Image: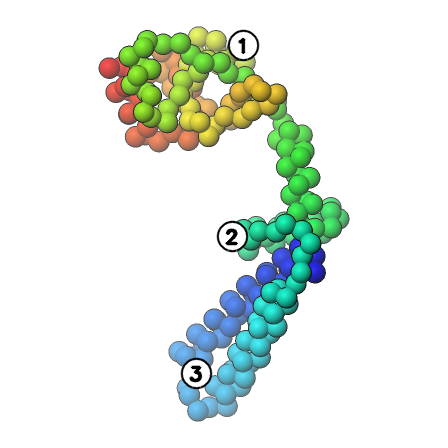
Amino acid sequence: MSIYDKEILELKKEIIVEVINELKNIKNFKIKANTKAYSELNKTISKWDLEINKIENNINSSNLNENYSFLKIERKTLESLINLNNRLKFGTLSELLESLTFNYEDVFSKDTLIEIKPFSFKKQIQLNLNNTNLYICEIIEESFDISVNDKILYKIEDILIYDNKEYLETKNLKRYPIGNEIFWISNNLTLADIDKFNSLYFY
């Protein structure tokens, strides 16, 4: 059984489980016991329970020659991936995801990225920020309305690396005047992060 077939079975099982839960809810709360409708509903639930057992047996007995790990993924996301894979004809979802990952730079254009460099500031400020996940940098050259004199406040997860150079995504930055300086602050920062930075930078 291919990875794609296995993913389809997992999706089918999840849908059937949802149907069974809804039928049980109807049986337990909306239909009187000892009626024909109650009896027929029990038969239907039993039939779907057997179908789930068959699916689980198929999944457990499959012998994949590929390395495969289960990832928790929302059903809607999985359905979207399956539909996309059907249109693009990649064969398996793994091949689709591998292609999307490989072509990441083309899919998500580098045109909105800015190259950054470390910012030199007072030793005390550096010491203050050492135990935080807040970082300050400058840009290599002026672009996207960001001046070389502006400072950028970001978190480590904002960093993108290409050809051993560090970049930030300009779409994730917002301009804030702090004191007499202009900062571009990452959307990943919370108000608490900004307050913490103010207390450490303007000590």
Residue 141 disc label: 1
Q: Residues within 10 Å of mark 2 (few under 14, many from 20)?
A: few
Say which quadrant the N terminus sits in: bottom right
Left or right: residue 44 compared with residue 6: left
Q: Quadrant of residue 54?
A: bottom right
Residue 31 disc label: 3
Q: Secondary structure at mark 2?
A: loop
**Disc 2 target residue:** 72
**Nearer to us: label 3 or label 1:** 1
> If you read the primary sequence from the N terminus, does the residue marked by circle 3 or circle 1 appear first?
3
Q: Residues within 10 Å of mark 3 (few under 14, many from 20)?
A: some
Contact between marks 1 and 2 (CB within 8 A): the answer is: no
What separation in Å lies between label 1 and label 2 (alpha carbons)? 42 Å
| Residue nearest the viewer, comparing 194 with 163 | 163
Provide residue 129's location: percent of width, then percent of height.
32, 20
Q: Residue at x 61, y 54 (%)?
A: 79
Contact between marks 3 and 1 (CB within 8 A): the answer is: no
> If you read the primary sequence from the N terminus, does the residue marked by circle 3 or circle 2 appear first?
3
Say which quadrant the C terminus sits in: top left
Provide residue 128's location: percent of width, then percent of height.
29, 18
Amino acid of disc 3: Ile
Q: Is residue 88 above or below residue 60?
A: above
What separation in Å lies between label 3 and label 1 (alpha carbons)? 71 Å
